[in-house]
Amino acid sequence: MINRSLLRIKVLQVLYAYLKNPAPSPSAAMKEFRFSLDQTYSLYHYLLLLICDTTAYAAQKLENARHKNLATEEDLHPNTRFVDNAFAAQLAKNKDLLEYIKEHKFSWTESYPEVVRNIYEQITASELYQNYMAQDSSSYNDDKEFWRSCMHEFIPENQELTKMMEDYSIYWNDDLNIVLSFVLKTIRRFEQESGADYQLLPKFRDDEDLDYAEKLYRIAMENAEEYTQLIDGHTKNWDVERISFMDRTIMVMAVTEIINFPTIPVNVTLNEYIELARDYSSEKSPSFINGILDNIVTKLTNENKIMKAKIIK
């Protein structure tokens, strides 16, 4: 689930903090980096669980309505399509999800009921919900697509959820949209025939990705001063003092990858870190960083210091 693009973001966040304040030991910094990855994987499970807990909240509301002293005909015979959603029922029994939630002892309903209530109210007030509930019948794929649409439409901008995430984990600040994309992918790939045995996404595609991230972080920390000097040597037409710390950190990571990861093509590295600059730095940073890194690649190639001799077009 945690791919290399997301790993680069995580390395950038922790490396930036470390270089700004190198008080923690390198081993403590590495421990913090690993913990940030654990937190990202937790968010993946918790967002899936939100579907189950919101459905359970809706079911409880229907049950409470049935037992009102002056229950209406609608209270006694409600439309149960939402609470009977086949995909939500399957997810609530998923073995991977249940095992993870049991181990981490997390519940939206118990700890953050306001988030569940807010999500439920957003959904039920929507045209998406009205159209879904008005259908004569719904298939498993209809039920699955309904929840995929709900997660896509209502999760990114939900203020209660955003507030909860800020309070719960500092590592979630930039994770939501990326992790949500994996949640949507997971929903799309669910199969009714798999029942409770459908396998959720693993934390990493393989061990190589984690090794890559830890090596990138460690080498960048150890060589930050040397690589910064290399970068400064190619900024003669710039006021070095005015180059942002974020731009420097991004370029340190890029140089680290260019020199120490011969299997990653140079153009892949350049594209990835220019994208990071677009998301985490100023409007002019991508073109600035691209120009500096191009010059560095030319210099290192001429000096035979990198194996990747040419930028692949």
Image (cartoon, grey):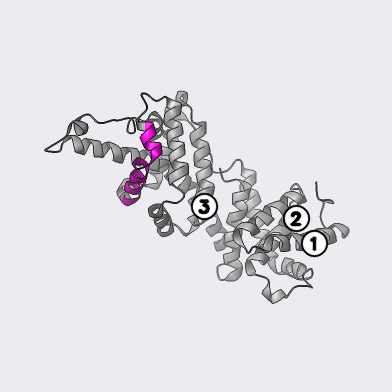
* Label 1 packing within 10 angstroms: few (<14), some (14-19), many (20+): some
Tell me whether circle 3 and circle 2 mark residues in contact (CB < 8 Å). no
Q: CA distance from mark 1 to mark 3?
A: 31 Å
Q: Observer-nearest residue: 61 or 129?
A: 129
Give SS at disc 3.
loop
Question: Label 2's element?
Answer: helix
Where residue 201 sits in the image (x, y, percent)?
52, 38
Looking at the image, which is closer to me, 217 or 193? 193
Main secondary structure of the magenta stretch: helix
Q: How far apart are labels 3 and 2 at the CA level?
A: 26 Å
The magenta region covers 114-132
Tell me which amino acid carries mark 3: Asp
User: Residue at label 2?
Assistant: 258
Q: Amino acid at mark 1?
A: Ile
Residue 144 position (above or below residue 168): above
- Residue 296: assigned label: 1
Whether 264 is drawn above or below 52: the answer is below
Say whether disc 1 or disc 3 marks the residue closer to the N-terminus.
3
Give the foreground label among 2 and 1: 1
- What residue is rendered at 65% in x and 70% in y? 244
The residue wearing badge 3 is 175
Element on which disc 1 rests = helix
Label 2 sits on what residue type? Ile
